[in-house]
Amino acid sequence: MKHLVITLMIAMLAGVANAQNPKRSELTIVDKVEIKLTAEEARHINASQRVSVDLTDALAKMSSGGLGMALHKFYIAEYDEQTEGKTDELTSTYNYRNGWWLTDIYDETTGELTGECVADTVYTPLMYIRDIELDDKQLSMTVGQVANTTIPGNIYSALLYYINGSNAIEIAVSLTITDAIVPKLEELTKVGERNLDVSMYYNGSYKYRSIEFPTDSLYDAIYETLPQPDCVGYEEGKLWGEDMKLVLYAEREENVIDDYATAFYGGYWVDANGYICNHGENAAIFCEPENWDMNVFHVGIYPNYKLIDTTVKAKLYIVGANCYYQLNLKVTITPQPTLAECVLAETLNYAMEIVPENNGTESLIQADYMVNAISLHDIVEQHFESADLVFATYTYIPGQGYGPMPSATNILNTPIANVAQYGYQMTDISFFAEMMGDESMLHLAVPMSPNPPLSIAYGICYNDSTLSFWQPDGVRQVGDFYTAEYYLYSLDDMKKVKLNINVIYVDQRNPIYNIVGTRTVELPQSNAEGTDYGTMTIDLTDMLTALECSNINEIQWAAYNNLGQLLITPDFDDIYGYYFDANGYLTTEETKVFCVGFADGAFHSLLSNGTADTDYSTSIVAVYNGKGYKFNVKVTKDPQNDTGIASLPSPLKGGSQVYNLSGMHINTNTLPLRERQGVGLRGIYIINGKKVLVR
């Protein structure tokens, strides 16, 4: 008995395995069921219909074959690339919502399309069958056609198989395509109208603008015109509007509308007269919904420079039921702006420290030596609304010369690591200094394989608001540094940000601090008598909070040198702080112009070798645990700072939250009465979150 059970189990498993990948040539067709459908050509969006058929008689002809019906699935042939026909082996693996995308196959003899469709996701689908359900004896499915792929007069078909053992029911689904009925404009009711004026510059690409359209006004207009459905379960809102299957139409000729889409998502290419055309020389603009979404339209220009200084007008019609909403589109095409016309929003200085590679490898994979990055996310978010940004720098092309103005066309085909953008390779300055007789020239970008070959200093790439750097192996040494100008700009926003970047080769990188806060302060040039440093006490509660530091004595101070490196140097004086030159960079005591420091709970500043009527600026950064809080400092004759210090002449109240400037908490409840009244606590304290002078 035990062996019999095992034998039966093996037989059942073999049957299941066979059922998973049956061959059409080995099946016995016990019955054929036909499902014949008719539909208008879907010229704009996918169109489908739900259909049901009774399989009672067909199922009665099936034998059990040792397996229950619950184990059976629906099968279909797949596309065979070798013969461009169908495979004999069937599949039950769905590729679309419990069903399949279906593509047409060829007759192996004639080489012509047969109209029979099989499962495939690689080639363009013509029709689809999805959501197949068998409820008891009732089979239901959704049968549809893909927009703008079927031809009126053609019949498209697919064969499905319901299998039990070696027996099968063949279900033949056919879809006859008829001509689409295009409404006449004069037979529709106009419910609204809106002008869409767009100004675009020509840039030789298929760049487009996205225009938001308030569909609520469209739905409201249609609601007011058409009677609302009187049915059980109806709810007011957009669901009814969606059921009306709104379709975008354009003009084939004056007042003759058509929905035969020539652009993506049911959109249209339009010629200079505003009429539908195909992609090509006669095309002027395109207008299309964003992924079938009527809320947003894409409007773009065909890349033909002759369109510059022209205006294209076109009418679009959003049709639902027996009414339409009209959009009057006017596109003014202007010349492309230049970088010089963009407003300079900000100039930023960066230092990128790189440890030289010297692995003895002539050609490393760039991903192997892609190191370091500068994030520009905050800058991009602050200054630009457009996502279409250009990163550019000055270039030199051998045989063509020096490029004085950055341009998107200067981006060289130098792939950098795993990013999807391209970058620049920057030259060694010596070549240009010798050639141009100007040793102060900035470093320039050059082609990947110039002739004659040039020495490459480093590579730089911009992608997704981040700058990345790479270096050639065995070329640079510690102490080398390179200075170049870059621009990040948007011609849509007409704004630009200038980036001065120093790439410095070091034996060990300095710590990189995450700047978590910034504040501007003004400090005096000296004390009131003009004999020594000036002192300014400022509320630093925000700084301590941002740095997550409870003790101000644990703060270290850093400043920038002329290469943009943020450094903590050992020459920080306890009173005078750091020495700065006239440009606000770290310098030595011998060449100092002014000093800025922090000690004893206060900022100190002194003008030593500068002009009293001149303001000097620098930045010092409070650093703690990898974070930095930046103070943009102006040393001036008449500082206008609000110190944030309040006066407390009255006694302290029990329970007050009191801290000294070192961040230490003072429990006032345990102090003697005399000290709670302020005696012995004279000085500056942080009380209940505010800087207070206790007298």
Image (cartoon, helix red, strand yellow):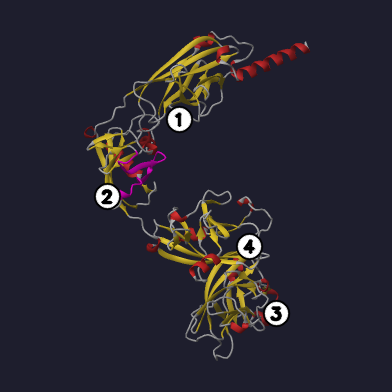
Give how far apart the Cα atoms at labels 2 and 1 are: 36 Å
Is residue 36 depicted above or below 392 in this figure? above
Q: Secondary structure at mark 1?
A: loop
The stretch in magenta equals 279-307
**Is residue 232 depicted above or below 623 in this figure?**
above
Between tags 4 and 2, which lies in front?
4
Dot placed on the residue nearer the N-terminal end, 2 or 1: 1
Residue 636 appearing in the image: yes
| Residue 598 drawn at (x, y percent) | 62, 78
Query: Looking at the image, which residue is at 68% across and 80% down?
Result: 673
Q: Amino acid at mark 4?
A: Arg
> Is 297 one of the magenta-colored residues?
yes
Mark 3 neighbour class, 10 Å CA radius: few under 14, some 14 to 19, many 20 or more? few
| Above or below 620: residue 334 | above
SS at badge 3:
loop
User: Which mark is on residue 476?
Assistant: 4
On screen, 553 above or below 326?
A: below
Instruction: Find disc 1 in the rendering and name its residue.
Output: 124
Q: CA distance from mark 4 to mark 2?
A: 54 Å
Quadrant in the picture for residue 546: bottom right
Secondary structure type for disc 4: loop
Question: Mark 1 vs mark 3: which is more N-terminal?
Answer: 1
Which numbered marker is on residue 311? 2
User: Can residue 501 be seen?
Assistant: no
The amino acid type found where label 1 is placed reads Thr
The location of residue 577, given as percent across then percent down, is: 62, 79
The quarter of the rendered structure image containing the C terminus is: bottom right
Q: Amino acid at mark 3?
A: Pro
Identify residue for label 3. Answer: 672
